Image (tube, rainbow, N blue to C red):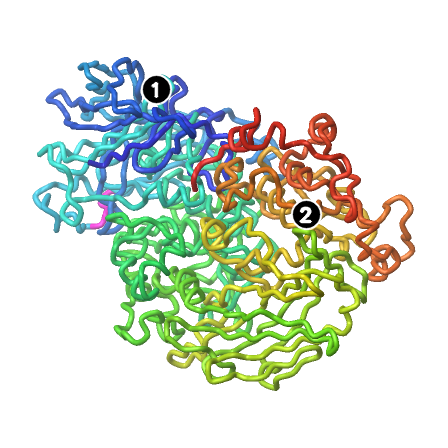
């Protein structure tokens, strides 16, 4: 039975998500304004702590279509303790069929028999406003969308058992709509469907596929078999034919304040459940996979809709958003939402929005790294064109190409287990849960619509005998791109009258566009007609057991464009880097020699060897050094003796040449020994006088070690422009200063256990600092601000009006995650995370309009060992908010590097700080009134200093400590990860 029970009375504290899975929010007229229930089934909705009866147990037990054509469903409903719920008064239902695709002979799509029209006002849509559309007119005045019904007959059978008979008659599933431009919304081609289908190989071989008509929406979304559109002018009639031999799905949601979804698949002609591999099925994703990031907060359209298996009964090719003109088909919409600001169409100047919800500034969080472009494949450097006429450059992946984060089948998982060498290492990647059809993303049943959802800088369809090019060369099956380009000022110079180029027609800097060298002539080759993509993109990996982790990764031949090469390289790289372990021994400070010495080696667990520079790896590892004075829980170094910037570490760089020669400007390296150890000696003569009398010194590894996994003609598959660079998790060691006993810094988060739920890779500051907050906090300490950046240095920030902002990890990370979730944006250096910032227009230099994808109030999402609880560790230092007196500072060299020395910014005794608890609380609760009226009267301070961390005596523990009236564990949405 396709029903999984989920708890459901948990109140989601955050409803606006970074990676929302629908086209409109609850306040934007969800599909059923009259129903107030919701649902769970197949995913996870956590209960409130201590509420043993928090969620209902909803199970569909049977479904059929009666002789009059009305679906009938029976279900049971129990409370969280297993007792029958006997007073259900409201529920809503969908009914969909899984129809074979019409454009090509493989794969299936859901389509709902229950529909509604979606008329919209003819102006005032703010996201549609542009220079060419000043009134904000929608693309179309009306559209068809899947819907639910609750106007049938609900029977209470007693003992928690119910029966619902639909008002829907499957033999009369037709709807006629009228609206502005509706005549441009659709196109049908007689005998346009593929003349065969894998459906004929299933046990329904005798089933008729229906009329060979092929209908599509203006954006190119093709409707499956058994759906037709008829009409003229601005009126259309949309009809879903009933095919009783095909797989059908009953979907439902509860009302009356109960939260649960359920779904049930069956074949009406036989009453049997469909069998994977025998009948048509489409079970691609589990809500458990979504919840690794979304943390049970996916509750859309008033909180009623939760489960992807329920969502797709409406979010399928049959549904269109009339405002943007785009399909809200799940596979297209969700891919586009997740790709967000890196969509080629967005980069080309066309925003991606659904009704009133703009997703153009979102960024998939799998990879957190600096922006940048990447090398091209072969001669195809770029596809598509920017408004200025230049090609859209290839962009570094943010992990959106890591398909197995969201969906994965058993075949892929088995391969990845082999690559990883076992389940334990694979589990660290936090990948999708296996589903029966989870490998559809690379198998023959994938669709052009799914690929084009992300790769929307190329057009995919060739002209057939039934097609006549529209003005500008526009393909009649996809007229929307040209309309969007005209409306939003994108390029219209492409062969199809928009920003796109053809397949395999990329731009070569030496020869221009492939073909005749002009964009208009970039028609491409091998455009999709009959499903021939597999010739290049489905190449089978070489069966080389010795190189199981490298299959298909080499750049030769079609390996570079094979789907599983391109879309598994991110996970392969993650696995490979986890097979590398940097092992550090404790360091020793020699005050007389003014050196710090330690030993290091890198273990390759996959090959059971230790790596050696220039033999089986390339080392360019460098190091950062800081310290914690005795009595403090945070770093107290501020050792920039040259520029006097505050809170800075000392860096010891050593590139590959340095590792080969064994020496650099302030570093020497000896070894390796027979056991793989290198001895590293750091010259600390320039900073030893700034070290405390007693304390714990700390050394963190940074930069890279890359294994030389040569394959084919490639020296290292992990160090090219196409594959994510592999780098071992950076580690930390300590040394004693004076008479102190060195102790590790307190652990607040765990990169492998918590951060990786959303972020599998970190590569900030040019990629030099990777993967581990234990490294990050050396620089991102309470004494460091962004005043050293060229956008500051005594000059007011463009967006916040401040002279500096704290870069303290505990303040910065909370603020970034919280930004645009009820808090102000934060300007760091020249970028704003979230928004809006206090000054500057609302379209300012946002850093991708960050949204936290889960519950921002669930501290367990990131924290380990109850580190979010009060009291804080002894000696926690508050964040610096002013490293000098802004009113009396020396501004003679404002904007220049000399500003730091002019104002002695590395002198921690002149810093003004938040008190420790206020540092964190005000990073989420950013309203100044909150500080003035709540925090400050209870001892919080903004006048703390390094010698007086808590001048007001913060007494937050009284209420917010364990057992208090406002215990953090109670007032926050604390749940297990």
Pick whichever, 573 or 659, lies toward us.
659
Q: Which element type, helix, strand or loop, lies under badge 1?
A: loop
Residue at 15% of width from left, 40% of height from top? 274
The residue that appears at 19% across and 24% down in the rendered structure is 73
Q: Residue 217: x, y in percent? A: 37, 40
Residues packed near mark 2 inside 10 Å, few (<14), some (14 to 19) or many (20 plus): some
* Callout 2: SS: loop
Q: Is 116 above or below relative to 612?
A: above
Q: In this view, does 638 lie to the left or right of 405?
A: right
- For the residue pair 357 and 588, the one nearer the viewer reads as 588
Which residue is more in the foreground, 670 or 188?
670
Q: Residue 255 carries which label?
A: 1
> How far, Cα to Cα, is label 1 from label 2?
51 Å
Q: Disc 1 or disc 2, which is closer to the eye?
A: 2
Q: Which SS type dominates the magenta stretch?
A: loop
Viewer-closest of 703 and 204: 703
Q: Looking at the rendered structure, which numbered label has been put on residue 875?
A: 2
**For residue 443, what is the image quadrant?**
bottom left
Q: Position of residue 558 (x, y in %)?
A: 35, 70
Query: Where is residue 42 shown, x and y percent of the image?
Result: 30, 37
Please say whether residue 757 is one of the residues in the magenta stretch: no
* Residue with the most extreme bottom position: 661
Residues rendered magenta in the picture: 190-194
Say which quadrant the N terminus sits in: top left
Q: Residue at x 18, y 22 (%)?
A: 70
């Amino acid at each position: 039975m396709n029903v999984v029970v989920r708890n459901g009375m948990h109140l989601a504290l955050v409803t606006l998500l970074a990676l929302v899975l629908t086209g409109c929010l609850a306040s934007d007229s969800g599909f059923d304004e009259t129903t107030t229930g919701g649902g769970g089934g197949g995913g996870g909705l956590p209960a409130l702590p201590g509420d043993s009866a928090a969620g209902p147990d909803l199970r569909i037990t049977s479904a059929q279509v009666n002789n009059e054509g009305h679906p009938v469903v029976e279900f049971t409903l129990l409370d969280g303790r297993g007792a029958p719920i006997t007073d259900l008064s409201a529920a809503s239902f969908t009914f969909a069929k899984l129809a074979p695709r019409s454009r090509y002979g493989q794969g299936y799509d859901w389509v709902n028999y229950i529909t509604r029209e979606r008329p919209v006002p003819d102006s005032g849509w703010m996201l549609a406003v542009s220079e060419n559309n000043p009134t904000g007119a929608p693309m179309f005045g009306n559209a068809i969308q899947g819907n639910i019904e609750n106007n049938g007959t609900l029977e209470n059978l007693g003992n928690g058992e119910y029966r619902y008979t639909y008002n829907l008659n499957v033999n009369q599933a037709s709807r006629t709509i009228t609206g502005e431009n509706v005549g441009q919304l659709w196109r049908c081609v007689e005998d346009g469907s593929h003349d065969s289908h894998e459906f004929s190989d299933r046990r329904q071989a005798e089933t008729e596929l229906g009329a060979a008509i092929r209908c599509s929406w203006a954006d190119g979304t093709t409707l499956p078999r058994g759906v037709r559109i008829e009409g003229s002018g601005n009126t259309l009639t949309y009809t879903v034919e009933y095919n009783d031999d095909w797989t059908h799905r009953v979907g439902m949601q509860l009302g009356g304040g109960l939260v649960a979804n359920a779904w049930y698949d069956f074949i009406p002609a036989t009453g049997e459940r469909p069998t994977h591999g025998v009948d048509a099925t489409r079970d691609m994703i589990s809500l458990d996979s979504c919840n690794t990031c979304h943390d049970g907060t996916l509750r859309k359209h008033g909180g009623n809709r939760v489960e992807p298996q329920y969502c797709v009964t409406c979010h399928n090719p049959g549904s269109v958003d009339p405002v943007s003109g785009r399909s809200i088909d799940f596979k297209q919409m969700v891919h586009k939402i997740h790709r967000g600001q890196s969509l080629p169409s967005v980069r080309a100047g066309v925003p991606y929005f659904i009704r009133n919800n703009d997703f153009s500034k979102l960024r998939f969080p799998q990879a957190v790294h600096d922006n940048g472009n990447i090398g091209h494949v072969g001669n195809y450097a770029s596809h598509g064109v920017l408004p200025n006429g230049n090609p859209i450059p290839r962009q570094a992946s943010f992990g959106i190409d890591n398909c197995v984060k969201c969906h994965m089948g058993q075949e892929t998982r088995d391969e990845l287990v082999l690559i990883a060498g076992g389940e334990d290492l694979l589990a660290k990647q936090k990948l999708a849960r296996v589903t029966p059809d989870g490998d559809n993303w690379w198998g023959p049943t994938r669709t052009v619509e799914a690929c084009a959802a992300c790769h929307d800088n190329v057009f995919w369809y060739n002209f057939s005998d039934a097609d006549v090019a529209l003005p500008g060369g526009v393909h009649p099956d996809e007229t929307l791109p040209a309309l969007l380009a005209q409306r939003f000022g994108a390029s219209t110079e492409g062969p199809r009258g928009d920003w796109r180029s053809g397949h395999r027609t990329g731009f070569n800097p030496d020869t221009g566009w492939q073909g005749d060298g002009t964009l208009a002539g970039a028609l491409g080759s091998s455009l999709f007609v009959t499903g021939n993509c597999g010739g290049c993109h489905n190449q089978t990996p070489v069966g080389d057991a010795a190189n199981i982790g490298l299959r298909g990764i080499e750049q030769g031949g079609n390996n570079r464009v094979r789907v599983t090469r391109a879309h598994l390289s991110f996970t392969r790289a993650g696995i490979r880097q986890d097979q590398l372990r940097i092992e550090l021994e404790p360091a020793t400070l020699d005050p007389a020699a003014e050196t710090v010495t330690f030993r290091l080696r890198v273990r390759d667990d996959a090959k059971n060897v230790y790596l050696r520079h220039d033999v089986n790896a390339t080392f360019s590892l460098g190091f950062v050094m800081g310290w914690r004075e005795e009595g403090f829980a945070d770093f107290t170094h501020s050792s920039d003796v040259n520029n006097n910037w505050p809170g800075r570490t000392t860096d010891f760089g050593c590139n590959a040449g340095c590792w080969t020669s064994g020496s650099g400007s302030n570093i020497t390296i000896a070894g390796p020994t027979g056991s793989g150890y290198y001895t590293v000696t750091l010259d600390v003569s320039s900073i030893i006088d700034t070290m405390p009398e007693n304390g714990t010194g700390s050394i963190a590894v940074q930069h890279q070690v890359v294994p030389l996994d040569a394959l084919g003609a490639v020296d290292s598959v992990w160090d090219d422009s196409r594959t994510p660079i592999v780098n071992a998790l950076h580690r930390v060691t300590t040394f004693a200063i004076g008479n102190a006993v060195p102790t590790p810094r307190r652990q607040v988060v765990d990169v492998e256990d918590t951060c990786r739920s959303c972020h599998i890779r970190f590569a900030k500051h040019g990629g030099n600092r990777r993967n581990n907050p234990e490294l990050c906090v050396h620089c991102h300490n309470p004494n460091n601000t962004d005043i050293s950046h060229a956008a500051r240095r005594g000059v007011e920030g463009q967006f916040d009006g401040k002279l500096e902002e704290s870069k303290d990890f505990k303040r910065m990370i909370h603020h970034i995650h919280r930004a645009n979730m009820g808090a102000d944006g934060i300007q760091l250096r020249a970028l704003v995370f979230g928004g809006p910032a206090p000054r500057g227009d609302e379209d300012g230099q946002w850093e991708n309009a960050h949204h936290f994808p889960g519950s921002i109030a669930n501290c367990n999402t990131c924290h380990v060992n109850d580190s979010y609880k009060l009291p804080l560790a002894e000696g926690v230092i508050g964040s610096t908010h002013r490293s000098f007196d802004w009113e009396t500072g020396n501004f003679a060299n404002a904007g220049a590097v000399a500003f730091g020395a002019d104002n002695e910014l590395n002198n921690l005794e002149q810093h003004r700080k938040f008190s420790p608890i206020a540092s964190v609380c005000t990073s989420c609760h950013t309203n100044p009134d909150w500080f003035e009226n709540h925090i400050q009267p209870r001892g919080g301070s903004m006048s703390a200093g390094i010698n007086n961390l808590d001048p007001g005596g913060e007494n937050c523990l009284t209420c917010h400590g364990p057992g208090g009236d406002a215990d953090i564990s109670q007032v926050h949405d604390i749940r297990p990860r």
